[in-house]
Amino acid sequence: MFDEESVRARQLRALQNGSHELMKLGLIDFSMSNGFKDRGTFMLTDKARKILLDNVKIACYDEVNDEHTDILKPDAINEKQMIFDNTVSEQYDRLCGLLSDKNLNTVRQRLEEKNMSRGFSILFYGAPGTGKTEAVKQIARCTGREIMQINISRMRSMWVGQSEKNIKAVFDNYKEMCKRSERIPILLFNEADAIISSRIDNAKNSVDKMENSIQNIILQEMENFDGILIATTNLVKNFDKAFERRFLYKIEFTKPTEKARKKLWQTIMTTIDDSSAAFLAGKYQFSGGQIENVARKAVVDSILYGEDNVNLAKIEEYCKNEVIGKSNKVRIGF
């Protein structure tokens, strides 16, 4: 491109130190490597791509067969009553209010006026079966927002550097989705234990290096995030401190109290009487997910063998089978 080596060297130095005119104009930026900007390679910015490819039809996020994400429409989500303890319920209701269209737009505008980040990164953490994923779905349903759900396990690749490219593409696709959506969608990292746990110091093998690289990319993307990100995890400790700081709201989904369990039994199994619900709530310290499993077994058996066969004794049998490792568990085999 350059006839004189000195001109080429001067242009390259300007690119590497970030002082090149194309960078000042916002047309070129550093590429990403291992979650950080690589000063040896460069890429076109969104601004440059828009100028150069303005009349070229580019497939947008919903036209791309992205195996790493699932798009969930709000009208495809069935309404479900969420039952939590008082503390969790208050935080959940407050979050629903914040993410309503009117409130969110007002809050984002005020934050921008104060030169603060407009994005919201939220962490739902706690024991399995406590309603974290369902809470995200119900928030999306009541606020009319689409969910871009990330399948973290499918993002990992055996090819060097491909996993990092996959995670970077997720955020690029989300930005495109935001541009084309009437309401800001929710970017959901479900079961994100692996990506928000403490990073491995002095990683030596390729897998550990890849995990650290993925975490670095997500951390950098979250730093300037402008949308709505929700991550769910079963972890209650061992959070990476860098991630902990980047989540503005952190809600712990605790196992339900006896009072909440009774309400869950009555809500999920509508045919159960008050005394039976109280008995089961007191005897079995189940999460909402476990109670729902029991209810599904009851429905299946009532269809196969008739409703008369599903009584309190039968429900207790389901409860005993729900917990793996109990000595009184009925074994299933051939």
Image (cartoon, rainbow, N blue to C red):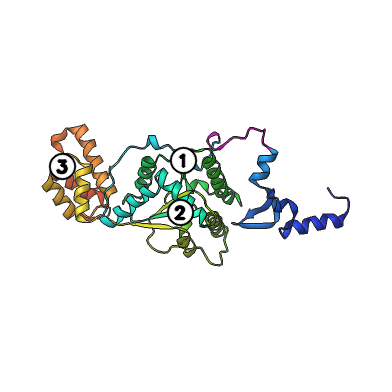
Q: Is residue 36 visible?
A: yes
Question: In the rendered image, which residue does mark 2 sit on?
Answer: 121
Q: Quadrant of the C terminus?
A: top left
- Residue 316 on image: x %, y %: 17, 47
Instruction: Kindly give the residue lying farthest to the bottom in the view shown.
Output: 202
- Asked which secondary structure carries label 1, the reply is loop
Quarter where residue 39 is shown:
bottom right
Indicate left or right for 163 with 249 as reference.
right
In this rendering, which labeled residue sits more in front, label 2 or label 1? 1
| Precedes in sequence: disc 2 or disc 1 | 2
Q: Which residue appears at 59% of the width and 34% of the height?
A: 59
Residue type beneath disc 1:
Arg
Question: In the rendered image, which residue does mark 3 sit on?
Answer: 272
Question: In the rendered image, which residue does mark 1 sit on?
Answer: 183
**For the stretch drawn in magenta, what is the main secondary structure?**
loop
Residue type beneath disc 2:
Ser
